Image (tube, rainbow, N blue to C red):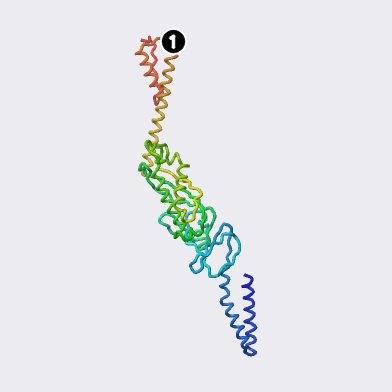
Amino acid sequence: MLLVVVMYAVAIAAMIFSGISLEQGANALNITGLVAGIVVTSLGWILLLGLKVLKPQEALVLTLFGKYIGTLKENGFYYVNPFCVGVNPASRTKLSQSGDVSETGGLTALVNGAQNMSLTGDYGSKKLSLKIMTLNNSRQKINDCLGNPIEIGIAVTWKIVDTAKAVFNVDNYKEFLSLQCDSALRHVVRIYPYDVAPNVDTTGDGVADEGSLRGSSEIVAVRIRDEIQKRVTEAGIEIVEARITYLAYAPEIAAVMLQRQQASAIIDARKMIVDGAVGMVEMALERLNEKDVVQLDEERKAAMVSNLLVVLCGNHDAQPVVNSGSLY
């Protein structure tokens, strides 16, 4: 950079002195100096194209006349062949993810009908970010293994580990990652039921298990991460983590499923109440026999059991009728 500045200063000085000398009398040396000064000032800026500045966690993939010659990954000030060109096919693709969201807003477009793209901020930069970024894809409506439509959203944490693969193996590594996340999510979700269901094998071992999207979120997240990683390895991308950020039944069946959950909860509660009531009745009969408080025949025992179960299992408080006469 300093040499280019000095060269420009010398060229300008040569043009000035050559112009003054030409007024006094033309000679070959003066003409040569003037022409050389004009050529240097006109074309010297090409040398400045070779100056590159990289910040931490940035990379620049360089090609020379279509041939890949290397990647700059260390932060600092570099000078490369001025005819080298930086390559980043995803430089204008701004997904709804960390590192791509501009604070100033601006022109937006739609990517694949699902992801918002912001064409603002560091628009058109040829540098690749090596930082860990988080992709938040839009929520998807997917049928689980039982055919119930659910809505699910994930957040995928990723980074570039091979810049050459990311640039040259796929057309646009950001769009490629987004599409593979959607595809992997659909593949994994269709294996699991939303909630625990009988006779469902989610592990592939041929034995029914209790895996579900709601109850096995950690296991599901790991499977989603591994599935995405298999699909994006050729693009030089490493998936650090995948997490489920939203999970719910689709609106068209949400009310019905809520009633189903309520009915299941009521049945479970009733079972517990009946089990407790039977135990209390058994205890009452045993204590009466032990203390020899009263002698009851089988018919009176049946009546007593019936009355106790009604009192203990009823939805409302019982209204007892007091018999002031004899027991029989």
The image quarter containing residue 247 is top left
Quadrant the N terminus occupies = bottom right
Q: Residue furthest left?
A: 299
The image quarter containing residue 321 is top left
Q: Residue furthest bottom?
A: 25
Which residue occupies 48% across, 52% down? 135
Q: Position of residue 125 (x, y in %)?
A: 52, 63
Q: Position of residue 157 (x, y in %)?
A: 50, 50
Q: Is residue 22 left or right of residue 65?
A: right
Front residue of 258/86: it is 86
Which residue occupies 57% across, 73% down? 45
Q: Position of residue 123 (x, y in %)?
A: 50, 62
Depicted 184 relative to depicted 21: above or below: above
Depicted 187 relative to depicted 282: above or below: below
Q: Is residue 270 left or right of residue 130?
A: left
Quadrant the C terminus occupies = top left
- Which residue bears the numbered disc 1? 293
* Kind of residue indicated by mark 1: Val
For the residue carrying disc 1, how many other residues have a C-alpha within 10 Å: few (<14), some (14-19), or many (20+)? few
* Image label count: 1
Depicted 326 relative to depicted 274: above or below: above
Front residue of 106/272: it is 272
